[in-house]
Amino acid sequence: MLVVQKFGGSSVADAARVMNVARIVTETYAKGNDVVVVVSAQGDTTDDLIEKAKEINPGASKREMDMLLSAGEQISISLLAMAIEKLGYPVVSLLGWQAGFQTNSKYSAARIKRVNSERISKEIDKKRIVIVAGFQGLNRYDDITTLGRGGSDTSAVAIAASMRADLCQIYTDVEGVYTADPRKIPNAQKLDEITYDEMLELATLGAQVLNNRSVEMAKKYNVELEVISSLTQKPGTKVKEVCKMEKMLIKSVAKDDSVARVSIVGLPDEPGIAFKVFSRVAKAHINVDIILQSVGRDGTKDITFTVPAESGDAAVAALQEYCDQVGAKKILVDTDVAKVSIVGAGMETHEGVASKMFEALMDANINIQMISTSEIKVSVLIDKAEAERAVAAVHAMFFDN
Ligand code: ADP
Ligand code: ASP
Ligand code: MG
């Protein structure tokens, strides 16, 4: 079997953890498997590197940021390889470019175009355990790129897809995917399995346990993923196309508190306004999430929408001129908001799921500012200060009997 194992930052945070990972990897290898390992930077290394850069130049170019941040993974691959050498197994560590990761040129958020896995295959043929630096690649100018925060998950899935691995295990600091963040909700339950679609929604809606692009790629190439703990190694959560028939109304509750709400007050109530607003936002490459438009009154209407927190000011900048031109009263941005969501394929066939969520929020006396739904999720925008309480209340409503 070819197994890809990915270890996140907390799993390789210090020497003891690195040795622990070396044991997991060599046990897998000793069972006769070919093993490719992807690792992230140790502990808070990536955050620390970002701080170091800020001390020198908060406006550093993204190219130089990628050059810096990719160093974190270089440390962990070599340390892990040394740990495996110590256990007496053949091993080689490879940077992203050595492992064949070709990306586009979007520094800090590069997309993988191709993994040319020839080198990895050669090393496997030599019976070596291959350790690959996650989160990084090379663009067509031979410059180092990084894939965006949490990108090592995607590196692992990309290798699994390109080499048609039999299994891709994502080792982390919790035992799997839970009904809510287990660090925030102590009685959250571990899920045995979850579908790609559900996991994709969850990851996009703020559950950081898997990076959403990795899930998207796993679904596209049908890579079976398992989220599992590097500390306990108990059976984790399988992410796959279909799950067993089950009665779960929803699978999990997620929270995203890096959201900004943008409101344009007093737009003309006439055709074409939504297009004119959102085409400007799109031109600025800003992702819009929930949209709400008020019913027109006295010839004017309001449009409110949410964007990632860091794009709030850019959205205003993109709209200011147009709003002045059509005489809109004002544009407001609020980052004291959070999005709380429930996700589950069960809601497709059961009515009343959304209202159950709203009931939990009513009972907790939490006001809903905006609502958005799809087949398998319901999201509400609320006051950021209430977000943790909202997750607890909604989780209790669905999972406490
Ligand atoms: P790694 O460093 O291994 O990549 P991350 O910190 O990126 O790990 O992701 C693991 C964290 O995701 C957990 O520690 C947990 O707090 C958080 N998390 C959020 N939502 C969930 C969830 N529904 N299930 C499991 N973990 C979750
Ligand atoms: N080290 C990178 C980060 O902290 C990549 C990863 O951990 O997946 O975002
Ligand atoms: Mg992660």
Image (cartoon, rainbow, N blue to C red):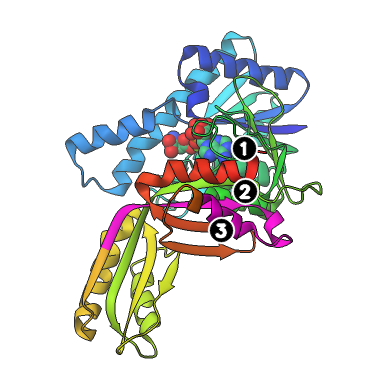
Q: Cβ(mark 1) to ligand 1 < 8 Å?
A: yes
In screen coordinates, is 343 left or right of 321? right
Separation (CA) of disc 2 from disc 3: 14 Å
Query: What residue is pinned by disc 2?
Result: 199
Residue 52 visible to the viewer: yes
* 10 in relation to 138, above or below: above
Element under label 1? loop
Q: Which residue is mark 1?
A: 177
Quarter the C terminus occupies: top right
Left or right of residue 325, residue 398 in this image: right
Q: Are marks 1 and 2 in contact (CB under 8 Å)?
A: yes
The question of residue 359 being in magenta is answered with: yes
Q: Is residue 299 left or right of residue 24?
A: left
Return the residue nearer the eye: 298 or 120.
298
Instruction: Tell me the number on the disc at residue 378.
Output: 3
- State the image coordinates of residue 118 (x, y, percent, origin top left): 63, 40
Q: Position of residue 378 (x, y in %)?
A: 56, 58
The crowd level at tag 2 (other Cα within 10 Å; few <14, some 14-19, many 20+) is: many
Q: Nearer the viewer, residue 388 or 47?
A: 388
Q: Amino acid at mark 2?
A: Met
